[in-house]
Image: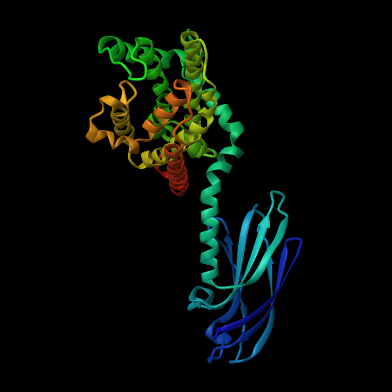
Amino acid sequence: MSEVFLRPTVALQERTLTVRLDVRNTTRSAWTQAEGWAIGYHLFDDPTSTLVIDGERTPVSLKPGENLQTELSIITPPEPGEYCIYVSVMQEHVAWWYERGWPFVLIDLAVDDEGTATLGRSRVADMRTVRLRRAGRSLTRALTLPFSATWNNRSLIRTLVRRDVMSRYTGSFGGAFWTVLNPLLLMLTYFFVFGVVMNTKFDNDPSRTGFALYFLAGMLPWLAFSEAIGRAPFVLLENRNFIKKLVFPVETLPINLVVSGLVTEFFGLILFVLALGLLRGSVSASVLYLPLVLIPQIFLTAGLAWFLSALAVFLRDLGQIIGYLLTVLMFLTPIFYPESKVPSVAASLLKFNPIYVLVRAYRATLLEGRAPDFSSLAVLTLISILVLIGGHAWFYKLRKSFPDLI
């Protein structure tokens, strides 16, 4: 049997919320004002479950089985946001009884930017209902917030990416041309070492031209991935002024790195397609599969960038560690050499390397005129979505501590 019976009527007029309650004491003990029994309310910020207002109490005296009609007036907060109000029986210096499992009145409230309040749903609930509601909302937010935060700040991201790309080469003679020249020189260096000095050949095309094309196709996803992941541990420290002094959507900073890496890859892809057209005379229609490959690549890179940028606030050596791990990962991925050169013991482990899956997909769509392996791409996409959601949740959980630690 419930310890209290509540029947609420809720009305909103301008900024005043009126809650009329029919309350019945269904316990075996009397409630007296002398013992601190009252009806009160707590107002919470709904998204964070933070207590905003510990409201006034209305004293009550009820014998077992008695009814009482009472009324509370609640002034809605002026700050915009989503709120929830708990109207509950309480006993001063003992407990808010909703915390002990008693039923209470749960009221949803929203306040817009102009301070206008909108009344949502009101009902009798208990903490089990609230926990289920929070779990559902947390799951929904975890699934949607990485996408909505990026989309809502797309103009800011575009501006910051443009500034990032241009500022890296400010004052140089080449200017933004270095965006193309840097990856080109890097790829030429690797080509000389592996293609000319070591005379490495790929099985599908053993010519030197074939090596160049297979090698460059494998470098395209690596360029975008390694640039974003290599810079992620430093991005919050480099932009500490945004974090400490401004109300700034700090979650966009790792995304800026992802987009900057894609800009670098975009220029590299243009050069690659031009070279492919000149060397082979045409470009296969299978290149249209490439956007499907980019989806898990972007999700994976963004999730890791969020995770590493937040972790680096607490572990300042992470940047040096990641630089070393990226070098190891690059040489463990068959970018400079064919898969046939991998020892049989290690070959079975390649399928766990997400960059290897991307490299194979790029070569299939750009060079081999066929669709990527959809089974491995589907697995990678699922893993990338989980990494994206987990990385953003990690970043979102830790972001409040950034101003104090940076």
Q: Position of residue 83 (x, y in %)?
A: 62, 59
Give above or below for 141 relative to 96. above
Q: Position of residue 351 (x, y in %)?
A: 34, 37
128 or 223: nearer the eye? 223
Q: Quadrant of the N terminus?
A: bottom right
User: What residue is rendered at 27% in x and 12% in y?
Assistant: 199
Give above or below for 75 relative to 169. below
User: What residue is rendered at 53% in x and 49% in y?
Assistant: 143
148 or 41: nearer the eye? 148
User: What residue is rendered at 69% in x and 62% in y?
Assistant: 120
364 or 60: nearer the eye? 364
Q: Position of residue 3 (x, y in %)?
A: 55, 84
User: What residue is rendered at 26% in x and 10% in y?
Assistant: 197
State left or right for residue 199 relative to residue 111. left
Q: Position of residue 77 (x, y in %)?
A: 65, 58
387 or 203: nearer the eye? 203
